[in-house]
Structure formats: structure tokens, C-alpha cells
Image (cartoon, grey):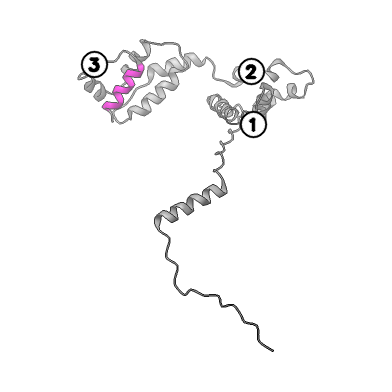
């Protein structure tokens, strides 16, 4: 009886050539495509607000609004926005709304976000915010060791609460500048707008 012949499969003993940089790059791109695009970064949740520090209310509301904008599908109406903010209240702030939350007859602010934030501000916001901002704006000074960028960031924050406009704002911003900045400004045309003054000071203090 004859023995069946076996097919010989040639085996290469040669070492595969290493991938070139181009091939490695193409392989890496392929892996990224397989796994899909990276997920959207998640915004941090707002810090809880207990009403003990009125200065924190504006930041708290801003953090909530950032999440509204990042997840429009979850916050399609004002009622969902109000419920979200209420879930991050605690302490005195939550106690203030507890009775109305449990009341079957809901107040107007329960379905109107602007009315709700007005309610929060009237109970826990800074008293006379405009007057306080004006006083801080008039007393704001940039010392020689300060950076112009930080000075203008603080100035803009306070200016957003007042209604001075041009030319009062650039005049007040100039008055608060450090002496060495003012000395350097004599070599330039003095801007008559806050934006123009900001650009000039950045160039001087760069």
C-alpha cells in the first residue's frame, strides 16, 4: 500500500522587515478609526450652593448654565433647568425653597428659569450689586508688581455689573494703571476705547 504524499509548505526563516515610520503612522491612524472618535469631554458639575456666601451665587449660576449649553437635549425647557439647580442647593438655600417644592401649587418661578434666578438673587445675592461693583471699580489699582492681564480681567468682571460705557470705563481703567505703564504710554497715542486701551497695555506689558 502506497503512503499518501504530504504537501510541503515552505517555511521562511527570514526575519520580517521592521515597519517604517510611515507604516507605523498609518497603523496608528487605523487603530484610532477602529475605536471611533474620542467622546465629548464632560463638564464638571456645579459646586453646591448653601447660601452662606453671596459672592459664590454668580459662579454657581454660571456653572449651571454651562451644563445647560453642553447638554441641550437634557434641558429643553425651563422647568428642567430649575429642577437641576434645585438639586444642587443645600443648607439654608434649600430650606428656603423646601415648602414651595413640596406644595402642589407650584409658583411661577418653578417653570421660569429667569424668575427662579431672580428669586435666588433676592434671597442670597449680593445686596446692591451695582453699587458694590462701582465702589470696587473706583478703588481698583494695578501695582507695579501686578500683571496688566490680571488687572484687566478683574476690571472687566466689575465693569460687567455697571452701566458706565464709553468714555467713563477707559478713563477709569487708565486711572488704575501702574505708574510705569502710564509713563510708557506717553510714547503712544492714548486710546479712547476700553478695547483699544487694553490692547495697548498688553503690548507695553508683554
Front residue (pair 122, 105): 105
Instruction: Please identify the quadrant where the C terminus is shown.
Output: top left
Residues in magenta? 194-204
Whether residue 48 is in magenta: the answer is no
| Residue 136 image-quadrant placement | top left
Q: Which mark is residue 119?
A: 2
Across and down, in percent, residue 73 comes to 64, 29
Instruction: Please identify the quadrant where the N terminus is shown.
Output: bottom right
Q: Earlier in the sequence, mark 2 or mark 1?
A: 1
Whether residue 200 is in magenta: the answer is yes
The residue wearing badge 1 is 88
Callout 2: helix, strand or loop? helix
Residue 9 placement, left or right of 107: left
Q: Earlier in the sequence, mark 3 or mark 2?
A: 2
| Residue 37 image-quadrant placement | top right
Dominant SS type (magenta): helix
Residue 191 placement, left or right of 125: left
Across and down, in percent, residue 78 comes to 66, 21
Callout 1: helix, strand or loop? loop
Q: Examine the rendered structure and indicate whether residue 73 appears above or below residue 31.
A: above
Residue 196 placement, left or right of 157: left
Front residue (pair 149, 28): 28
CB atoms at circles 2 and 1 under 8 Å apart? Answer: no
Amino acid at each position: 500500500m502506497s503512503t499518501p504524499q504530504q504537501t510541503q509548505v515552505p517555511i521562511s526563516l527570514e526575519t520580517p522587515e521592521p515597519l517604517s515610520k510611515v507604516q507605523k503612522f498609518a497603523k496608528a491612524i487605523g487603530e484610532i478609526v477602529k475605536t471611533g472618535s474620542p467622546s465629548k469631554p464632560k463638564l464638571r458639575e456645579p459646586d453646591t450652593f448653601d447660601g452662606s456666601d453671596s459672592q459664590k451665587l454668580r459662579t454657581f449660576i454660571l456653572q449651571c448654565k454651562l451644563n445647560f449649553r453642553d447638554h441641550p437635549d437634557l434641558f429643553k425647557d425651563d422647568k428642567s433647568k430649575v429642577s437641576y439647580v434645585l438639586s444642587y442647593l443645600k443648607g439654608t438655600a434649600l430650606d428656603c425653597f423646601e415648602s414651595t417644592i413640596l406644595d402642589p401649587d407650584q409658583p411661577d418661578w418653578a417653570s421660569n428659569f429667569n424668575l427662579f434666578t431672580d428669586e435666588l438673587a433676592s434671597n442670597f445675592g449680593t445686596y446692591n450689586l451695582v453699587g458694590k461693583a462701582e465702589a470696587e471699580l473706583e478703588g481698583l489699582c494695578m501695582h507695579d508688581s501686578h500683571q496688566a492681564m490680571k488687572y484687566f480681567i478683574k476690571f472687566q468682571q466689575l465693569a460687567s455689573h455697571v452701566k458706565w460705557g464709553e468714555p467713563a470705563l477707559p478713563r477709569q481703567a487708565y486711572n488704575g494703571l501702574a505708574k510705569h505703564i502710564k509713563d510708557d504710554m506717553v510714547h503712544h497715542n492714548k486710546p479712547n476705547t476700553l478695547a483699544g486701551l487694553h490692547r495697548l497695555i498688553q503690548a507695553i506689558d508683554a
